Amino acid sequence: MTNFRLSCEDQNTSCRCQGKSVLINSLNFSCYVHVCQVVYRLYNAVFLWQAIKRGYMRLQALFQSRVLTQRFVNTRNLVCRFQRYARGHIARKRARNRHRSIVKIQAGFRKILAQRQVRRMKLEV
């Protein structure tokens, strides 16, 4: 058995040890009961404190997970919006380049047709 000292002076109860620090091996019965009550109350208080602490930690973890989830959702939405605008810009740029290419091809083809028509008109005259 481990020897340790307990004092009864913190409690407002009558005890034969009369507030003296006593060695637990040499306790009489009423003082032993009082010490057991003190130890149990201490154990119960520590147990309740740990339960409160665990609950607080669970609440804090839940809050942090909600914050991180919301931050992730906001970031993902921001990235999706940016990608949507970027893809639209790239698609419009490609369409503009295609249109310019088509216009250049058509202009070159019309130029060739116009040159042929001018040659025919010169031959007819």
Image: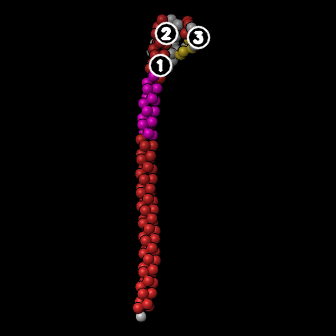
Q: Which residues are magenta?
A: 47-65
In the rendered image, residue 75, in percent from the top left (x then y), is placed at 45, 50
According to the image, label 2 marks what residue?
31
Q: What's the amino acid at mark 2? A: Cys
Q: Who's the residue at 42% across and 53% down the image?
A: 80
What type is the residue that disc 3 sits on?
Answer: Asn
Q: Position of residue 40 (x, y in %)?
A: 46, 16
Q: Is residue 9 above or below residue 95?
A: above
Q: Is residue 15 visible?
A: no
| Mark 1 or mark 2: whose residue is earlier in sequence | 2
Nearer the observer: mark 1 or 2; the answer is 1
Q: Which mark is residue 43?
A: 1
> Circle 3 sits in a helix, a strand or a loop, which is it?
loop
Q: Earlier in the sequence, mark 2 or mark 3?
A: 3
On screen, 33 above or below 60? above
Q: Residue at x 46, y 68 (%)?
A: 97
Instruction: Calculate the distance from the C-alpha at mark 3 to the C-alpha at mark 1.
Output: 18 Å
**Residue nearer the viewer, 75 or 52:** 75
